[in-house]
DNA sequence: TACCAAATTTGATCTGGGTCAATCGGCTTT
DNA sequence: AAAGCCGATTGACCCAGATCAAATTTGGTA
């Protein structure tokens, strides 16, 4: 049925999203330990730092690699580190005692993780494909931030942005029908990828159907059926590793917002 | 059917929650313009300020009163002020173009509103019952905060706390059944009221059934039926203006968390 | 090239919660 | 105290999406 194969996206987005296709490239660049040429330098927390500070900052973090499916941290774990996502995608989720899962977000390069009040993570994070993070021990990072209000301000900005996303997500979960959920997810995901890679009608979906279902508050079957429905109506085309937007206006109309 | 009338809660919680019962007390205390004896002094943003700073801070804000149902600000309005809720309850919500509503939260005394990146509010807020806020013009407040990292830190704390609440809310909306939604809402609401007033099995619900429905992603009918079901099973008792927890263990079990 | 395991799609059926439609009950007004 | 109004409750019915059960496709591996 699905005729078109995924056309290789630019090396940039491919590298940044990590191994969402099965290309096995080395994830840690040989020169990867200098903040100054870090891939996410422009938009991560560290965007707020001066070159001089950056050199000091460099010693606080260390790059850590996670293979596909590995867990970066778990809900209820005591927070010992903060994380700055460099490459790849994380699924952030909460589990109910009986195993039901709600994905509360996907983290992309530049996202900062680990802030909480309780001293414990309040969700779990694991790698979708290969992932590289910049890990900071909590105490030294805290001390560094203590004397650098602009870093705190940057972190606050990221938190405020996340809050806004969270509220949009609540509307989606509480008040949208399956088709609207999927359509708005595709558009929002595409939007989020724009600053990371070239804007394109090819939308890579590194996460599984189950992940999408758990993000949208649906079952995997409903997600699958809804994808098929959108494809049959000519709104999208399902391709290997993602979808291709065929009729953006129509998808926007279906998203009802 | 409902035999027990609401027993008057302590004056403290009654005053703080605002006019959730029809008692009409004067909302603005005569001495209300001194931060030092403000009701929310202990846990609002201003908790981070020194007595000396507080006196300067005092001149930045002004108390504003809103009657039941009045709108404090609307989604998409350009943000010109920040708000510190002093008394009463606000419903915070987003609307879809066709009128569907999702309540993304209820604000209680001590909550700080108005932070955003876009320069526009990303949700609407209106009063449930009589409400008093402390309103700050954006620019002066920003300037004041600029030189006071501890205030920024406090605001960041509040944002992080809200994010955690938002994630819990997502799990509720996406993965819980109606009965679980209502049970966990009642417990979480009770929990939130604890620091404001005496902990009690009497849980005031100042918001309407429609509000509860829009908060939980249900219809008003389902909320009503589910309340009745919980009451018939002896878990709660529906009283005027709220509910009374009869069997907390059972409600906790129903909340499935 | 064949085989196995996992992910996805498709089909058939069921059901929780939505929709539509009366009441009901408590306030307010007259 | 009667009338009117509005929020809440209750009942009857329906449907979007869940559940259960196969296929089918994909990816990895021998």
Image (cartoon, coloured by chain):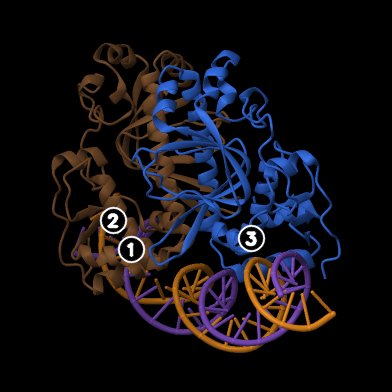
Chain colours: A brown, B blue, C purple, D orange
Residue in the image at 68% along x and 44% along y: B17
Q: Are marks 2 and 1 in contact (CB under 8 Å)?
A: yes
The numbered mark at residue B145 is none
Which chain contains the residue that carries disc 2?
A
Horizontal and vertical percent position of residue A43: 27, 31
In the foreground, A9 or A177: A177
Q: Is residue A60 above or below residue B138?
A: above
Q: From this viewpoint, is residue B115 visible?
A: no
The numbered mark at residue A255 is 1
Residue in the image at 38% along x and 39% along y: A161
Answer with mark 2 or mark 1, whichever residue precedes in sequence.
Answer: 2
Q: CA distance from mark 3 to mark 1?
A: 29 Å
Disc 2: which residue: A187
Q: Quadrant of residue A10?
A: top left
In the foreground, B200 or B62: B62
> In this image, A117 relative to A6: left or right?
right
Horizontal and vertical percent position of residue B206: 67, 53
In the foreground, A104 or B182: B182
Q: Is residue A240 above or below residue A114?
A: below
Badge 3 marks a residue whose secondary structure is: loop
Q: Is residue B233 above or below residue B127?
A: below
Q: CA distance from mark 3 to mark 2?
A: 34 Å
> In this image, A19 relative to B220: left or right?
left
Disc 3: which residue: B208
Badge 1 marks a residue whose secondary structure is: helix
Residue in the image at 56% along x and 28% along y: A119
> In this image, A73 relative to A203: left or right?
right
Residue in the image at 23% along x and 25% along y: A38
């Amino acid at each position: 049925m699905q005729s078109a194969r995924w056309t290789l996206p630019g090396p940039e987005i491919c590298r940044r999203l990590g191994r969402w296709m099965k290309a096995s490239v080395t994830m840690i660049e040989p020169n990867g330990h200098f903040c100054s040429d870090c891939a996410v330098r422009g938009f991560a927390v560290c965007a707020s730092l001066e070159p001089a500070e950056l050199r000091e900052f460099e010693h606080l973090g260390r790059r850590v690699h996670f293979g596909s499916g590995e867990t970066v941290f778990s809900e209820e774990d005591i927070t010992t580190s903060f994380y700055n996502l460099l490459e790849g995608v994380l699924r952030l989720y909460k589990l109910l005692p009986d195993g039901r899962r709600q994905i509360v977000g996907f983290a992309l390069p530049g996202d900062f993780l680990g802030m909480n009040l309780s001293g414990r993570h309040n969700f779990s994070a694991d790698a979708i494909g290969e992932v590289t993070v910049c890990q900071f021990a909590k105490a030294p990072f805290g001390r560094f931030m203590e004397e650098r209000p602009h870093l705190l301000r940057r972190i606050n900005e990221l938190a405020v942005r996340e809050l806004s996303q969270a509220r949009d997500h609540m509307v989606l979960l509480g008040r949208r029908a399956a088709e609207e959920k999927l359509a708005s997810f595709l558009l929002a995901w595409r939007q989020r990828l724009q600053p990371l890679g070239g804007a394109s009608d090819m939308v890579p979906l590194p996460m599984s159907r189950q992940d999408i279902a758990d993000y949208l508050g649906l079952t995997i079957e409903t997600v699958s059926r809804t994808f098929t429905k959108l494809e049959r109506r000519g709104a999208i085309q399902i391709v290997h590793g993602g979808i291709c937007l065929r009729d953006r206006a129509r998808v926007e109309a279906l998203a009802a917002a």
